[in-house]
Image (tube, helix red, strand yellow):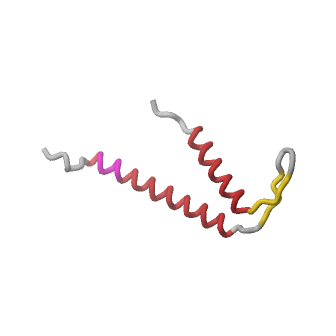
Amino acid sequence: MSSDVMTNAEHRVRAGQSLRVVIWLAVIAAVVVFALVNTDEVNVDWVVDNAFVPLWAVIGASAVAGAIIGYLARPRRG
């Protein structure tokens, strides 16, 4: 048999992977658009100081921090 023919299970796995990539790209695009629309400066209160920071930077930093925490907190397959 030829190894070029995909089985039904392989086809489902690839379709699931493609759907996951499309969903991630849509989420990233939504976060980028949301961040770029919010251009005001906001007062960020740090533990020892406070500063005025563009809102898009706060949104971006929050999205990156959330992605990292989500990646680290996900259950591991063993």
Principal SS element in the magenta part? Answer: helix
View extreme (top): residue: 78
Q: Is residue 11 magenta?
A: yes
Q: Is residue 28 above or below residue 71?
A: below
Q: Is residue 3 magenta?
A: no
Quadrant of residue 3 within the rendered picture: top left
Magenta range is: 10-14
- The image position of residue 21, as x and y in percent, is 45, 55
Residue in the image at 20% along x and 50% along y: 5
Q: Is 7 placed left or right of 62 in the picture?
A: left
- The image position of residue 71, as x and y in percent, is 56, 42
Residue in the image at 52% along x and 61% along y: 26
Depth check, front residue: 19 or 43:
43
* Total marks in image: 0
- The image position of residue 24, as x and y in percent, is 50, 56
View extreme (left): residue: 1
Residue in the image at 58% along x and 63% along y: 30
Which quadrant holds the C terminus?
top left
Depth check, front residue: 66 or 53:
53
Which quadrant holds the N terminus?
top left
Q: Is 20 placed left or right of 57 in the picture?
A: left
- The image position of residue 70, as x and y in percent, is 59, 43
